[in-house]
Amino acid sequence: MYKIGELSRLCRLPVKTLRYYADEGLLLPDMIDRFTGYRYYSASKLADCNRIVALKELGFSLDEIRRHMGADEREDVLMLIEAKQAELTRVIERTDAQLRRLDTLKRTITEGENKMYDVVIRNSDSIRVAYVRKIFASREDAYAELELIRSSLPANIVGRRNLIVNHETEWRECNFDFAVCVEITAKLPQRCGYFERTITLQGDIASLVCRDDELEAARTDMTKQLYELPAQIVGAFYEFYHEDGTVELKVPIVRLSRSENTDAKDEFYGEFLNDAEAVGMWELLDIVPSREQFSFHNRKFGDIDNVLLRKLYFLPQGEGYWFINGWTKGFIYTKNKYKSAYEIESVNGETLMFVHLKECGYYTRGGRPSVYVYHRCDSKEYKKSDIRIYDDVDYPFISDECVLGKWSAYDCIRMDTENNYDPSEKQYGKELFFTSAEFHPDGNAKVTYGGKEYDRTWTKGLLLHKNEKKAEAYDIREINGREYLFIEWKSGDYVFGGRVIGCYVFVRG
């Protein structure tokens, strides 16, 4: 599965645009991790996304894209492309680049072939370089910096290769976090203005060779091949430039198993060791595959607002809450039974925490944890009651005859699929936690979950849990002649994370 951020980079679309396409029903995620908020897309959705991107860049409207993607016959696809060609020739401001892209797309469809790059897995690589890392407005600026380094160093110590270390994790149009490097064969002169560094790629390194004008296509193809291998990309992309325009593209990877090992859990940390520096509230800055890719001046993860652990609390004496089952010095222990290491450091005058969070997805298939980077907000000694969300539950009772009676649990779905829900395709394949909900005319209600019955109250549009101070919205909808009751599921994801991830679907009876 691709994360939404990875899909954003590969398809050259902002994360917000991908969410918009999901709302429009063009590109729905295959899975949303309830703990992290990650959206995951299958390889087939990557192909759909690439098609949407290509057609959108060529000027197709969303309605035209729907028809294009729904076309079954090659002739229908070609008719759509040819119609757009005619339109482009009539519009002066449309660029020649778009026409060339359209011709390329047409040839791809008619010939049925794309260029494939040979990806090989090697062990390690090492290069000694003069090194500068900063934010470059464009690739051209990075290339110019390479030439400046070469021209300012003594010719007798300059090697044959240039290197760009691309620390970006999502596709972007400008402001790149690059390290530009020139190979050297001896020590740098003093006060030359550049750092001297030996860059060593260790472990499994995926590599391919392409021309410099094929770099973006090669990187996209490489990423797709690694996903299908399957493998996890665990660091920056290294672009080695040779004098004749040949580029070696390399990236560190970890090979993955095709199935998840959900039985492999960590032992609980045992005796609590205090860490006074950790106590308090921390706010998420970024999520990166490797520590080296973090930069204060260039955040990598584009979907921070949809991450459940946007705020991380360390309660006194290692007390846990919600997703955090507890902590001890150097580690947090999560509800999924994993022990994740953390380090606290001062960077640019600010206190940061780097959490190597083990989560569903890559880690359960033998991959590495993602690095969650937090900055300190305060050092308060919070209690669980201080950090949870409390809804207003003091509503006057307003009757709603449509909801009266008993409803039986039918399905549990993601909130972002509610408007397009198809009862014939159940989303939850396991036994449902909720069993039933019953609404009485006097404003009282009963819900059954976990094999037990609980008292609730209700008013029009809301199921109320006054003790827990939760107000869960409900909605009744008729689908194919049958009524379905949708009730928000405000679990700990909402109470402590601020987001309603899913809802339960009920039917009468």
Image (tube, helix red, strand yellow):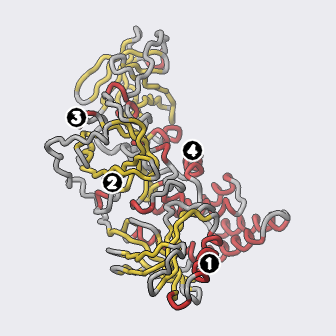
Q: Secondary structure at mark 1?
A: helix
| Mark 1: few/some/many CA within 10 Å (<14, 14-19, 20+) | few
Quadrant location, the C terminus: top left
Q: Which amino acid type is shown beneath numbered disc 1?
A: Leu
Residue 384, horizontal then vertical, whole percent: 31, 28
Residue, x 52% and y 52% (percent of image)? 302
Callout 1 touching callout 2 (CB < 8 Å) = no
Please name which of the two marks, 1 or 3, marks the residue nearer to the observer. 1
Position above or below: 97 against 158: above
Residue 125, horizontal then vertical, whole percent: 38, 80
The residue carrying mark 2 is 356
Q: What mark, if any, has residue 317 been given in the picture? A: 3
Lower position in the chain sequence, tag 1 or tag 4: 4
Please name which of the two marks, 4 or 2, marks the residue nearer to the observer. 2
Q: Is residue 425 visible?
A: no
Q: Which amino acid type is shown beneath numbered disc 4?
A: Asp
Please name which of the two marks, 1 or 4, marks the residue nearer to the observer. 1
Residue 222, horizontal then vertical, whole percent: 47, 73
Relative to 344, 296 lies left or right: right
The residue carrying mark 4 is 23
